[in-house]
Amino acid sequence: MRLQHSLFTRRVFLNSLLGGSLTAFAAIFIGPLVKFVFPPYKEPDEVKLAAADYSGLPANEVKGFAWGNKPGLIKRAADGSLVAFVAVCSHLDCNVTYLPAERKFYCACHKGWYDENGTNIAGPPPSPLRRLAVSLDGESLVVKKQG
Amino acid sequence: MKKIRTWLDDRLGLEALSRFGMNKEVPQHGHTIWYYTGSSILLFLGIQIVTGVMLALYFNPTIKDANASVGRIMTEIPLGWIIRSIHSWSATFMIGLVLIHLLSIAFTKAYRPPREATWMTGVLLLCVSLAFGFTGYLLPWDDLSLAATKVGTDIPKAIPVVGTWVTSLLRGGEDVTGDTISRFFIVHVCVLPLAIFAVLGIHLFLVQRHGMSLPLEAERRKETLQSLPFWPNFMLREAGVWLVLLGALLTTAIFLAPSLGPAANLMSPAPPGIKPEWYFLFMFQTLKLFPSRILGINGELVAVAVMAAGFFLVLILPFLDNRPAERKGRIITGVVYATFAYTIAMTIWSLL
């Protein structure tokens, strides 16, 4: 049945009302479910390492550490200072390695190359390796986010 | 016996179904051979389900035990090595046949009306099959599978706005971790099986509803083709094909059992020579070739956009190829051949 100036029949109105309400009711649960599938994770603000472990590191050599779930590399620069990188390729997230003989970082996944300062020089990587700030605090080496 | 049958039929109404099976006919023509690919895919799907359930009896989807439990399956469990090898090889056979099935339908243009929806559900089944392959590849949790999963789940990051979100949805966090194994495992053994049954149900229903497609030429000339009863004549031939495929599967599975590397370490560099499964190689090679920036845009984004557009074109192919017998149809056939050639060439290149 359709009222005189109505655009749709009573049946269509009732169907849409019920269907729409059920859809809206189901939709309420999407939010909490989506929330559930993302576990909380925060990148560390800083990581403290035993300075003694890294003090004997020769120039042009690297030593690994854990930057949260990612690998980090501490490297002795030519001037004797320590620099830290997140050892993850800026292309597609593979873990990179340092090749001391070539003075380059290398990503084996898609043949990406970075120079010893972490600047992307060849292959697909679009940007340099991420650098972290290194400072000495008593007995510990503090690796922090830069900036 | 007859009493039980009548009793069951009164309740389930199976008579109509079996009558349909008995009366089903399969047309005989030059392209009949391609009809066998569909049922062969089902054979390998069945093998995947059986061997998959067996493997899940011993597999532990945790970062600590995943690799070791696969090692245990291969070294300690009776016949474990061959079950894993069959599961791995049957996946390859199944995806290979899915691709052949798809190509045969593209080349014979069997997606002509009214079979567009059958084609589209088929493309979805290809996606589900690839998702099975991708999630399954991580589960042995060795160096190669970790690196391949890091790359594969990082690709969506190139998508603007939602990319990072998609990547952490896939990984269960910012990085590939133990949470990723649990996630991939449950998707591999629960979510994807539900999805494949749902879509396959529609696909098979549509195949039966529309019947087997005829070659374009025969249909145009309104030829009446000879046909073979599905039961028992065609079934017998199918059984022969299955037997040959089963023999090929067992032979490869026995002689070329998949290896298992040492457990993946989140902190160690990617091993040299990483490669995804063969069916992703053409994408892998394409990604390698794309420069980091194209006209000021992120090269990865361009690569992802090109692949997404390619997928979308495949999905809607029946609608693009709406005049199959005319010049447009021949051009589209040419494009399909060119795409096929590109895929083969890229795959071979990536293996060199």
Image (cartoon, rainbow, N blue to C red):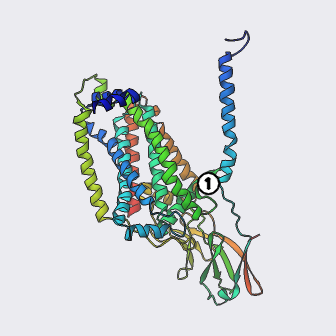
Looking at the figure, which quarter contains the N terminus of chain B? top left
Name the quadrant containing residue B325.
top left
Q: Identify the residue shown where x is 22% and y is 40%.
A: B236
Q: Position of residue A17 (x, y in %)?
A: 69, 26
Secondary structure at numbered mark 1: helix
The 10 Å Cα crowd at callout 1, few under 14, some 14 to 19, many 20 or more, is some
Residue B326 seen from this side:
no
Q: Position of residue B23 (x, y in %)?
A: 28, 27
Residue B182 seen from this side:
yes
Q: Identify the residue shown where x is 38% and y is 48%.
A: B45
Q: Position of residue B298 (x, y in %)?
A: 60, 55
Mark 1, chain letter? B
Q: Which residue is mark 1?
A: B169
Q: Identify the residue shown where x is 77% and y is 69%.
A: A147
**B109 or B329, which lies in front?**
B109
In the picture, measured across the screen, residue B281 lies left or right of residue B147, that is left
